[in-house]
Amino acid sequence: MVAGPYDGVESLVTVEFRDAGKGETEIVVLHERLLSDKAIADHSHGWNARLDKLVTCLVA
């Protein structure tokens, strides 16, 4: 594993699964304690990419 710019920085991730009706589930990800706007943008991009991949896998 390659070291990244956020190694050693602690943050808090909360994932909530909500019933969206009709057999669907809404996933809410709250990522707290990020220390800069760049960290927020980087993690937001990462979470969105992973969740998009999850949707692709579940729909297939």
Image (spheres, rainbow, N blue to C red):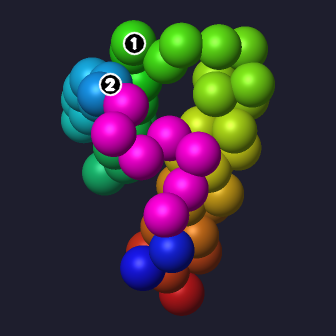
Q: Position of residue 32 (x, y in %)?
A: 39, 15
* Image location of residue 24, percent across then percent down: 37, 47
In the shown orientation, is residue 31 left or right of residue 49?
A: left
Main structural element of the magenta stretch: helix, strand or loop? loop
Whether label 1 touches label 2, CB < 8 Å: yes
Residue 43 visible: yes
* Residue tagged 1: 33
Secondary structure beneath dot 2 equals: loop
In the displayed structure image, the side of residue 2 where residue 14 appears, left or right? left
Placement of the N terminus among the 4 image quadrants:
bottom left
Which numbered disc, 1 or 2, marks the residue that appears first in the sequence?
2
Q: Which residues are magenta?
A: 3-9
Residue that badge 2 annotates: 11
Mark 1 lies on a secondary structure that is loop
Q: State left or right for residue 31 relative to residue 57.
A: left
Residue 54 in the magenta stretch? The answer is no
The residue sitting at 69% across, 38% down in the picture is: 42
Near-viewer residue (26 or 49)? 49
Task: Report the amino acid beneath label 2.
Answer: Ser
Residue 30 against residue 15 in the figure, above or below: above
Residue for point 64% across, 23% down: 40
Residue 10 higher or lower than 50, as above or below? above
For label 1, the crowd category at 10 Å Cα-Cα, with few meaning under 14, some 14 to 19 and many 20 or more, is: few
Q: Position of residue 26 (x, y in %)?
A: 40, 36
Image quadrant where one finds the C terminus: bottom right
Q: Amino acid at mark 1?
A: Arg
CA gap, disc 1 to disc 2? 5 Å
